[in-house]
């Protein structure tokens, strides 16, 4: 489970928006010292907003500015990365192969490549939309505390 601590910035009907500073992945990475991403994050203090799912009891208890720990399984990160990057490229290559068999002109092959890439992007977007409330693939709240750092609730996995 990858865990990240952040601050609640907004509460929706089915989840919360959490602002985090990206550090946990960089601290566990072997290339931390030589990575440009790590240096930029340290220099700019770049924050990211992440939507995390919460049940109704959590939503009633949480308030803006509460500190939360969100978590997501490691396999979701790997499969999500493969889906996001590999599927559009695979469909682009398939588009090139199909259009090169059907047409001799290179401009049609380029259109086939672009069509495959766009179809792959649309499939990734559809998958994301269909899984927006799936707790198996979305970040979830593991624990939270008040801004005064007094713990209210802890969920153990």
Image: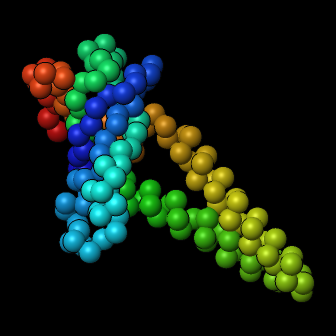
Q: Is residue 69 above or below residue 120?
A: above
| Residue at the spot 44% in from the left edge and 22% down from the top edge | 12
| Residue at the spot 86% in from the left edge and 78% down from the top edge | 107
Q: Position of residue 108 (x, y in %)?
A: 86, 76
Q: Position of residue 7 (x, y in %)?
A: 28, 32
Lateral position of residue 59 relative to residue 27, left or right:
right
- Residue 136: which quarter of the image? top left
Lateral position of residue 106 relative to residue 49, left or right:
right
Q: In the depicted view, which residue is nearer to us: 22 or 96?
A: 22
Lateral position of residue 84 relative to residue 143, left or right:
right
Q: Tell me if residue 114 can be seen.
A: yes
Q: Is residue 142 above or below residue 120?
A: above
Residue projecting furthest to the top: 60
Q: In the depicted view, which residue is nearer to us: 41 or 100?
A: 41
Q: Position of residue 81 (x, y in %)?
A: 44, 61
Q: Is residue 20 above or below residue 81?
A: above
Q: Tell me if residue 57 can be seen.
A: no
| Residue at the spot 29% in from the left edge and 64% down from the top edge | 39
Q: Position of residue 102 (x, y in %)?
A: 87, 80
Viewport quadrant of the C terminus: top left
């Amino acid at each position: 489970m990858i865990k990240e601590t952040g601050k609640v910035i907004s509460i929706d009907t089915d989840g919360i928006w959490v602002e985090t500073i990206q550090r946990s992945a960089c601290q566990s990475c072997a290339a931390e010292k030589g990575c440009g991403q790590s240096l930029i994050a340290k220099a700019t203090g770049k924050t990211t907003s992440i939507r995390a799912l919460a049940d109704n009891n959590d939503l009633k208890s949480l308030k803006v500015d509460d500190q939360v720990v969100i978590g997501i399984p490691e396999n979701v990160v790997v499969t999500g990365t493969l889906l996001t990057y590999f599927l559009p490229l695979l469909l682009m290559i398939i588009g090139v192969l199909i259009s090169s068999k059907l047409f001799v002109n290179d401009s049609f092959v380029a259109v086939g490549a672009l069509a495959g890439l766009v179809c792959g992007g649309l499939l990734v977007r559809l998958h994301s939309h269909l899984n927006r409330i799936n707790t198996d693939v979305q970040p979830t709240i593991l624990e939270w505390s008040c801004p005064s750092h007094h713990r209210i609730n802890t969920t153990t996995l």
